[in-house]
Every structure is written in C-alpha cells, then in structure tokens.
Image (spheres, grey):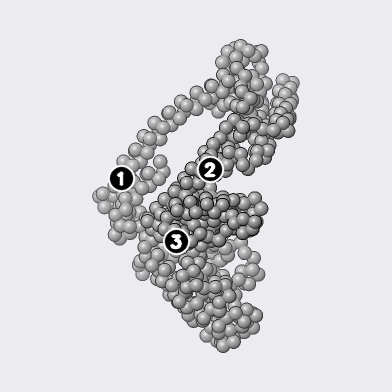
Amino acid sequence: FIDKDQVMNLMLWVPNWDGVIPQPAILKPRPRWTGKQILSMVIPKEISLYAPEGNSDIPPKDTGLLIQSGELLYGLTKKKNIGSAAGGIVHLCYNELGPDGAMAFLNGVQQVVAHWLLHNGHSIGIGDTIPDKETIGKVQVHIDEQKDQVAKLTAMATANELEALPGMNVRATFENKVSMALNMARDQAGTTTQRSLKDSNNAVTMAESGSKGSSINISQMTALVGQQIVEGKRIPFGFKYRTLPHFTKDDYSPEARGFVENSYLRGLTPSEFFFHAMAGREGLIDTAVKTAETGYIQRRLVKALEDLNAQYDGTVRNSLGDIVQFLYGEDGLDALCIEKQKLGVLKMSDAAFEQKYRLDLANPPNWFIKDYEYGNELTGDKNSMGLLDEEWEALQADRREVRAINRSKMGEEMMQLPLNIGRMIETAKRVFNVKATDRSNLRPSDVIPVVRDVLAKLRIVRGTDPISQEADRSATILFKALLRSRLAFKEVVKEHRLNKLAFDHVLGELQNRWDRSFVSPGEMVGVLAAQSIG
C-alpha cells in the first residue's frame, strides 16, 4: 500500500490530473492507497475491459482483469492487456478516443510507472533462483522416477519385448517413449518449482507480467535444464556407437544421450556442458539462417503485393485496375474497428433465452409493472404485443442461423465483430447519468421499429440485385445478430434502463461509427497484408 506523500508525488505524473486525490482504499489506522487506484487515474473513463481467467467473478488470487469505466477493479495489468495486442487497452483507447487519446494513455502509463520504479526499483539476483530443500528433493524424485522408466524401456528393448507403435520400428518407438518420459520429468519438475516460488519472486514477477522470460526459463534455472535436442533427436553418436569417449559403447541411457539433470544454478557436468553447447550452436545457426530466409520471403511478398489498394468503389485493385477482391476482406471493414465480442445467445438454454428476451404483455412480469414507466398502460396493448412477437421471432431466427454457422467451431461465443456495442451503451449510460434504479421511458414502438430501420441501413454491399443482397446478408449476418440481441427491448429497458435520449444517442453513435469503420479508399492494403504476415 502507498502512503499520502508517495501518492501526491505520483499524481503529479498523471496527465491532465484534476488536482483531486482519490479516496484512500484504507482509512484506519492510517490512510493508504493501492497501486490499482493510481493506475486507474491514467486509464480513460471510456475504457471497460473484462478478461477473465477461470470462471470466478471474484478471483481469490487476483487473476484475470476487470476494468469498468476506467476503474481497475481486479487483476494485474500484463503485457497482453496493456501491450500491442488486439483488444488491449491501447487498442480500445484508439477506437474510443482516437490517436491522441491512445497517445495520452501510453504517456500517462509510462510516466507514472517510471516514477514508481524510480522509488521502488526492480532487480533480480541469484537468490531468486534458489529453491528450498523440500523442492530440491521433490525435483530429484521426479527425475529418478522417469529415469527408472527409461531403464525399464531399455531393458525391454534389449530383451526384444518392446511392441512397436503403429508406423514406427522398434528403435523409433523406443526413442519416442524415452523422449516422452524425459520431457515429463522436465515438466513435472518445472511445475513443482513454479509452485514453490513466492509471488514476490522477481523472476516470477517478470514472467507473469510478460516483460521478460517464461516459466521454462525459471524451471531451467531452478530445477533442471532438460533434454538437449540436435536436429530434432537426442544427441547422436558422434564416435563409434557412443556420443563421447566418456561413456561405454551402446549406452542409450539419458545422461549419455544429452539429458541434463542439473539446473543452471547447480551447474552442468563437463559432458552435459558439451551437449548443451551442441544444442545451443544449432540454435544459433538456425536463427541466422531463418532471419535470412524470412527476410527474403517478406521482401518478395511486399514486392508482389505493393500495388494493391482499396478503391473508392470498395474493391481492391492493382496498378492495372484489375480487381483482386470485390470487397476488402469480404466485408469492406477496416480491421482496426474489429474487436473480440461475445454473442451470448449461442450456449444459453432455451428457457434462459426466453427468460432474457421474451416479454409477454398479456400477463406481464412483476418488474414490468413496478420498474417501468408505462407498465400499466401497455399491459395487453395489441400493437406493442405484435412488435414484441416480431422481435422475438427475429431473435430466434438469428440464434438458429448463427448456431448453424458456428457448428464447426463447437459453438464458440467469442467472435471478431466490428464496433463494440456493449461499450457504446455503457458510455451512453455514463453521459446521460442513467442509474440502475431508473425507470425507462421507452415504448416498444420507440425501440423495435427504430432498431429494425437502423439495421436495414447498415449495408456493406449496396445493390438491389439478388447476388448483391445475398452478399450483403452474408457479410452482416453475425454483426446484426449481435446488435439485435444487445438492443432487444427487454434488454434495453430492464437491464440497461435506458431513457429515450440515451437510446437515441446509442443509435446515432452506432450509425456514425459504422459509416467511419469502412476501409479508407487509397489504403495500401497489399503492403499492409505483407507487413502483417512478416
């Protein structure tokens, strides 16, 4: 926890700070602030991000990440949330606030974190790689178990009792099983050490946050280095029937074929060091060769695609005007505005789906009378009932269709779709100060026909012939299903409690963003694609 002096110093590094120190997280015995509060000062109010790890809504170990309206509620910001990943905070800032907003966020984070590190520092030393006695014992047990397994396999192979696996001879089967056993030793030892290290361990901190290193590096420093591989196999026999003169001939044991059971901390034996040097040399050469190859491939790709660009008519053409794609990316949208979004209606049971979206005005539910402005007036209203039935049928049709499309993906609910409508609704609620207890003043006639008209206006392929209409439908089907489910009457009125002004704002914003989300004419999409692959 951070005391007042440090908070005041940190606040000076927050860009556009309003001069108000946030309420401390702990009031007694002394006021103390958390790091999450400081970071929340930098995250713009427009940003909401939910990236769960596991299935708990309140993770006991602070895993996952939840940001609501610029407030970091739980989780640690890692490379995948704050880095250059799609759907990270920088991406959302750019989509919500434009380039200046994204730059302000990056500057803010850098200044605040740099100031924090100036006072608190971060270093790593030998002490971070030393395991406790118990762990060392457990690691040795893992190694011994798997080495016994290898000894058994060797005995079986010698006695000709080893059954060959399909498509392999006995020798290949033996090598395969030995490799599996030794890899298992490495993995088990790795997990054991990983568990024994504290969260405050500097190596673990670096691997967790994604700044440098991974769990494999930690387990190699602490537990064991593992099997050395040359050309995809264990170390080959360089001398007559053996790897080095230090071993007897025909020795297929783990240590004779390059299994390093020491950690970098304990140090390698001379033969282990030699095998490790062999594998390391291969890695260096491989890297050098790969760099040259991929660089040349990249250059050829750029040369091949350098003249492709998006035209004013939406097509992608080369310098001769030949059409390469009738519509950029089959949907004409700029990839910037596309985010991973959840289409929640797919895995829901029929009962839950009906509960969430169906509204029967003949016998309306309790909340409809109590928490809704026109509850009594609309009960049994013929026109509204017709509209709600029409909406319900459309939602059911969407659900059937998207389920059919998504069958191959095992009903995966997360999809790459343009324009985050959920965030637009949250922004509207914040701008128009909509509270969770408000009564909505929207009627079905204000919502359902309007949403239908807005969806009809969201076109990608403009044309009246059957082929254009079919292409347009194929390009927008998932997005429109998402919009229909998020802007359903019951959802808008019961969940979000939107009033007329806020709802109109959402629709206007949607139309505006949709018009701006198409790829800009003149965008050099060929070079962009070649760059992105490389």
Query: Residue 251 location, x and y as percent?
Result: 66, 17
| Kind of residue sitting beneath label 2 | Asn
SS at mark 2 in the image: helix
Q: Give the CA distance from mark 2 to mark 1.
A: 49 Å
What amino acid is at disc 3?
A: Asp
Location of residue 199 by image quarter: top right
Residue 383's tag is none
Which one is in front in this view, the residue at disc 1 or the one at disc 3? 3
| x 65%, y 25%: residue | 261
Residue at the spot of label 2: 120
Q: Residues within 10 Å of mark 2 (few under 14, many from 20)?
A: few
SS at mark 1?
loop
- Give the total of numbered labels: 3
**Above or below 372: residue 419:** above
Please name the residue that numbered disc 3 is placed on. Answer: 18
Residue at the image point whose x is 72% and y is 24% from the top: 151
Q: Which residue is mark 1?
A: 306
Q: Position of residue 50 (x, y in %)?
A: 55, 57
